């Protein structure tokens, strides 16, 4: 281990509980030890337990599973009911403690206006009769109940109802009773979720979401009273020495409903500002909380709590280190934390520990690898959220997420084994075969890797001089450093496995290499648009990203999907003047694309006055302009030095699918990193 990491591996205490090192698994929705969104209600979740145990065995000091609502989202039972799951939890904890790690169970009061409703749930919440009929299974009105009538974050046409005092007191009781059962099961502590991220408890604390006039509204003490009552109830049930952590957002970073603040921006905070946070942190400590597990943000500024690659690394550290000055309890920081930076902050007394979430999904063994000086072997999290947390929203939709995705949170785009260990596993092949993988992109490399691990003899063919495929272009912007690391990680695994790689080798359908099986991963081609001047004056997105063509100062990007928006962000950060033209009614208007990622892009362009034309069509491209029809039907001429087309791709398979021919990735159906890597496993496991 490098000396710079040594502060991460020193012990520390939460009350009287000693933790062996300063690395904390940040809780992630979907890793709940009591299950997540299953129709059977809460239970001991063995898939989550398997992941958590693996993380503990690989040198994480404190493990915090994802949120457990104190009242089941489906079925409406209280978490403390059905004692069987606590008996199973006790058996798990006996084995878990053999790793030397500690575990806190995180509980939440609920979501309030942040409940990510899908369209069917919006219909229920807006129709009292239908909701009453459905309430034995799912009570959408209760799930969205908030301190005051408020617009739902995901469905602007839904106004939440005000939660009642009786419901508040039932929740307080549920926290205490559940904590007592967790303590009896051998759990080391609990975490209250939270005065954090704009969830229900946080909505009570914030002036812009709490308009109550009773004992839970108005004054500072009243607004924070719900959170205070919860910790006092837990301490009454479990004793003063039983540790209780609080998930805490130092600052809300929120300018308005559905509008967050950019890093470094000077803005008017409508949520919790630093002045209030200094007071609140001390107040919550004095109420009985033993640790603050911190970041920033609300669901209106969601990219602070779930940072995409566009956010700076260690984006919350300055604020968290500041708030530590006002308390005497341990303070933990989360948010794209890097080990070297976290270690230095601990050494300097800025924080007590570093919390890491999705990197544990990408590589549950990353701490062990760090200890052994094997940083290059760590598979990086690329902050895409495309499998772990892809709740999506764009204009005109509620949470536009497939039900299967809602029920399968905390899977991983780059590591399909996480939370899917029963489906994805390396098994030795019954018969070793000679397999030719044609196309050395992300999907092709992953297929070759999995095949080799299973014992097949693999040859990988790539027509260019470098492995990576179209992902090289996707990783080109400066903010895509993790994408670049993923390519290098894959190259390293290919080399370590001794896979036969043929670069600068273009395979034709007429002359195939000798093999028993063929995996075709030849990708896709960029779409064109039937617009005058497009062929002559517009470049493809990959030409820009790979630096094949230079751009001028004023750049019109045709296509406001993810790639087009990332190009616009890249250009803006380089000091250029991008303009986006999109035919849909919003940017990145697709399903299963995380709102944390897309809202950053939308808010960034709005804040920085990057022109965006929605519901717009292109009629002509000239040497110096792009002529469009805007959403009102008016003709607008946009001056341009350069034009970039980002209007999607179409598959280009080398061969047709057959008995021994398998199509992988974009050459079968255009997708993303997740579809390429998961598809590679789906094929490679069957050969």
Image (cartoon, rainbow, N blue to C red):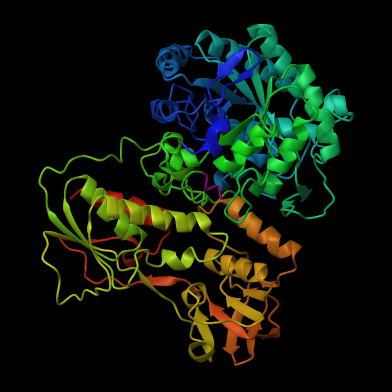
607 w.r.t. 215: above or below? below
Residue name at image x 72 percent, y 55 percent: 262
Query: Which residue is nearer to you in this view: 123 or 438?
Result: 438
Query: Which x, y percent locates residue 362?
Result: 44, 43
Query: Which x, y percent locates residue 436?
Result: 18, 62
Query: Which x, y percent locates residue 549?
Result: 51, 82
Residue name at image x 77 percent, y 34 percent: 323
Read off the magenta span: 389-393
The quadrant holding residue 202 is top right
- Left/right placement of residue 78 relative to residue 326 reads left
Would residue 392 be counted in the magenta stretch?
Answer: yes
Query: Which residue is nearer to you in this view: 444 or 147?
Result: 444
286 w.r.t. 540: above or below? above
Q: Is residue 24 visible?
A: no
- Left/right placement of residue 456 relative to residue 635 reads left
Would residue 627 be counted in the magenta stretch?
Answer: no
Query: Which residue is nearer to you in this view: 521 or 647?
Result: 521
Is the stretch drawn in magenta largely helix, strand or loop?
loop
Query: Which residue is nearer to you in this view: 184 or 240?
Result: 240
Q: Is residue 667 visible?
A: yes
Query: Which x, y percent locates residue 398?
Result: 60, 50
Which residue is the extreme one toward the front? Answer: 3
Q: How many marks?
A: 0
561 w.r.t. 424: above or below? below
């Amino acid at each position: 281990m490098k000396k710079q990491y040594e502060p991460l591996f020193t012990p520390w205490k939460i009350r009287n509980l000693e933790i062996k090192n300063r690395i904390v698994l940040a809780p992630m929705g979907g890793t709940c030890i009591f299950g997540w969104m299953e129709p059977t209600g809460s239970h001991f979740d063995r898939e989550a337990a398997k992941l958590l145990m693996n993380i503990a065995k690989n040198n994480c000091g404190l493990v915090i599973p994802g949120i457990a609502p104190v009242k089941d989202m489906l079925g409406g039972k209280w978490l403390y009911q059905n004692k069987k799951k606590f008996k199973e939890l006790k058996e798990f904890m006996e084995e878990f403690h053999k790793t030397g790690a500690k575990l806190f169970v995180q509980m939440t009061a609920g979501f309030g206006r942040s409940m990510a409703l899908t369209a069917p749930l919006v219909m229920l919440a807006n129709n009292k009769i239908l909701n009453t009929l459905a309430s034995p299974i799912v009570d959408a009105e209760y799930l969205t109940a908030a301190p005051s009538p408020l617009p739902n974050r995901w469905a602007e046409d839904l106004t939440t109802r005000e939660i009642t005092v009786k419901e508040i007191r039932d929740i307080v009781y549920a926290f205490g009773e559940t904590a007592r059962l967790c303590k009896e099961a051998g759990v080391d502590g609990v975490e209250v979720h939270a005065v954090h991220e704009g969830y229900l408890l946080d909505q009570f604390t914030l002036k812009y979401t709490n308009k109550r006039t009773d004992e839970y509204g108005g004054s500072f003490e009243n607004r924070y009273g719900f959170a205070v009552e919860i910790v006092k109830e837990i301490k009454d049930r479990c004793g003063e020495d039983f540790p209780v952590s609080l998930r805490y957002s130092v600052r809300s970073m929120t300018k308005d409903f559905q509008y967050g603040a950019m890093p470094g921006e000077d803005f008017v905070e409508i949520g919790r500002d630093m002045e209030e946070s200094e007071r609140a942190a001390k107040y919550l400590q004095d109420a009985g909380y033993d640790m603050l597990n911190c970041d920033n943000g609300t669901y209106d500024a969601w990219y602070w709590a779930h940072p995409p690659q566009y956010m700076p690394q260690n984006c919350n550290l300055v604020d968290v280190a500041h708030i530590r000055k006002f308390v005497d309890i341990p303070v933990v920081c989360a948010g794209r934390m890097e080990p070297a930076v976290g270690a230095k902050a601990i050494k300097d007394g800025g924080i007590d520990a570093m919390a890491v979430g999705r990197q544990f999904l990408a590589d549950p063994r990353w701490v062990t690898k760090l200890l052994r000086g094997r940083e290059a072997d760590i598979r990086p999290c690329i902050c895409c959220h495309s499998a772990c947390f892809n709740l999506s929203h764009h204009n005109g939709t509620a949470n536009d997420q497939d039900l299967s995705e809602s029920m399968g949170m905390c899977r991983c785009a780059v590591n399909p084994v996480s939370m899917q260990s029963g489906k994805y596993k390396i098994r030795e092949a019954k018969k070793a075969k000679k397999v030719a993988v044609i196309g050395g992109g992300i999907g092709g490399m992953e297929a070759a890797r999995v095949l080799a691990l299973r014992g097949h003899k693999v040859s990988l063919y790539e027509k260019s001089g470098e492995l990576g495929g179209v992902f090289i272009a996707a990783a080109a912007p400066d903010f895509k450093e993790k994408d670049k690391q993923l390519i290098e990680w894959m190259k390293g695994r290919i080399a370590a496995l001794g896979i036969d790689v043929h670069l600068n080798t273009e395979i034709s359908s007429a002359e195939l290499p000798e093999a028993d099986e063929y995996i075709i991963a030849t990708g896709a081609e960029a779409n064109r648009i039937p617009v005058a001047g497009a062929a002559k004056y517009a470049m493809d997105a990959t030409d820009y990203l790979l630096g094949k063509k230079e751009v001028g100062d004023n750049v019109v990007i045709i296509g406001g999907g993810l790639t087009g928006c990332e190009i616009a962000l890249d250009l803006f950060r380089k000091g250029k003047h991008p303009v986006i033209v999109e035919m849909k009614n919003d940017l990145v208007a697709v399903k299963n694309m995380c709102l944390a990622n897309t809202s950053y892009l939308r808010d960034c362009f709005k804040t920085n006055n990057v022109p965006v034309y929605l519901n717009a069509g292109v009629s002509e491209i000239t040497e110096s302009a792009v002529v469009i029809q805007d959403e009102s039907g008016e003709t607008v001429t946009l001056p341009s030095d350069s034009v970039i087309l980002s209007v999607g791709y179409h598959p280009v398979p080398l061969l047709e699918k057959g008995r021994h021919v398998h199509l992988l990735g974009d050459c079968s159906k255009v997708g993303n990193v997740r579809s390429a890597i998961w598809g590679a496993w789906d094929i490679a496991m069957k050969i």
